[in-house]
Amino acid sequence: MAQEKVRIFDTTLRDGEQAAGAGMTTPEKLEIARQLERLGVDVIEAGFAASSPGDFEAVATIAQEVRQPIIASLARAHPNDVDQAWKSLQGAAHPRIHVFLSSSDIHIMHQLRKNREEVMDMAVSMVSRAKGYCEDVEFSAMDASRTEPEYLYTMLKAVIDAGATTINVPDTVGYSIPEEFADLLRSIQSNVPNIDKVVLSVHCHNDLGLGVANSMAAIQVGARQVEGCINGLGERAGNAALEEIIMGIETRKDYLGVTTNIDTSQIYRTSRLVSDITGFPIQPNKAIVGLNAFRHASGIHQDGVLKERSTYEIMDPASIGWPGISLVLGKLSGRAGLRARLEELGYHLSAEDLNQAFEGFKNLADKKREVTDRDLEALMSDQRRAVTESTTYTMEHIQVSCGDHEIPTATVRLTGPDGSVMTDASTGTGPVDAIYKAINRIVQVPNTLSEFTVKSITEGIDAIGEVTIRVQKGDAVYVGRGADTDILVASAKAYLNALNRLLAMEEAKKETPTGVPNP
């Protein structure tokens, strides 16, 4: 008997970006979308087209470039939002307009400041409007888990009659307990007479740490679409982590009786890409993709795993694309060896990109006796950042003088977007402060450094260090990352990465797409 499929709806590019400090440029969103397509997700929510010119551009670009999944744009129950969603999706092979509207009394009274009848009319009207544009329309009753049940049933029946093809039941504030959430879905299926005409979906937040548990409980009682983000990104404490839901389904098919269209071997690569682009590190004990997920420290566990892996491992690390035994490369390794290992790690490069990667690899191999998989991942992250930055200052040279009896001084030479070369120097309270002040003298973009984090990517005295920073300009926060065996060079790379992203996003704000009013 064939198992039923659960659709995987990824909202990393929309709800995931709402995590404070997780803003992404259009090229970065496109890169993630392409990786999500390799992963095999059924729906990519590419953004909220009416919210900004940048989001409109991102949705439109992804709709044109990514052809296999359904591409969705979020829209409030407002005519302009629905219209802009459709304009952004016109190039999509499989478009979906996702209309949402609050349904709980607390939202209706205090946020919408309307009555129930007005809200009902808005929901029906905007689903009908979306249906006039495309066949695939999703409706989300925001804060459904705190909505009076009878009103929720009536609203859902009405929007299905108006043309909705997917009904999403969100636990918007992460309030539900799994059994309670399952009961809500059972009651919807029992009390909404036309519910059999749509796909039942859930969108669970993680405020009480129950996002995945609530999603799995929903699957057990008939939900056939689950929404979430890679690495559990999202507003506040985040969304249900898709990799955990996917592997929960994969590992417990015997119990759940459902399956997905996901290529699980792409999970590791997808997780690392999202972490790299957003600047949100993955905690070591994170389920499925954390550094310690397949490590065993206990002697009893080690003994068991050596004798039979299934004694303490319920998943094969290779099933999620986790790199196996690291193939160590050195400075005598050639292009073919580098290409082969990068392909095993999920990187498929053009001839030009391979040449750039090989040049970086040789420079790294001169500094390190052995280059491991994690070194290669850091190298590829640096190369990706350089390629995707559109407004680019490139670091050509950096020299730092410091010590316990010296005033820290840094000299930097940068190449600007127009190709001009600029050199400047500055002193500071420490070497990193001096570097950043020297860069500021050249780039001249006012900002505030709000976070500075250093960690070791690899082990040993010659380890690659990675710096993650966040800079703030006004209300906007921009992430920068850089990696190098020299932590001061990594710090300079991270700062330039953040400034380049700041400049790129400010440039995007100036370019208003056709049909989108100036905010």
Image (spheres, helix red, strand yellow):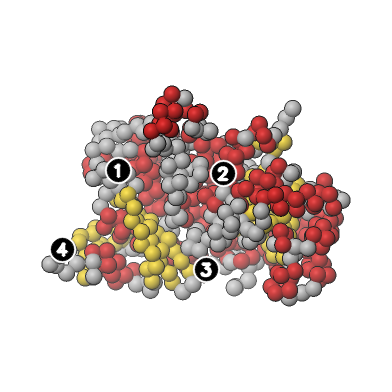
User: Is residue 307 at least partly visible in the picture?
Assistant: yes
Seen at 33% across and 56% down, the residue is 454
Which label lies toward us, 3 or 1? Answer: 1
The label shown at residue 374 is none
Circle 1 crowding by C-alpha within 10 Å: few under 14, some 14–19, many from 20:
few
Mark 4 → mark 2, Cα distance in angstroms = 47 Å
Q: Earlier in the sequence, mark 4 or mark 1?
A: 4
The label shown at residue 509 is 3
State which quarter of the image contains the C terminus: bottom right
- Amino acid residing under circle 2: Glu
In the rendered image, residue 289, in percent from the top left (x then y), is placed at 48, 43
The label shown at residue 403 is 4
| Relative to 263, 440 lies left or right | left
The quarter holding residue 42 reads top right
- Amino acid residing under circle 1: Glu
Residue at the disc numbered 2 = 244
Above or below residue 256? Residue 51 is: below
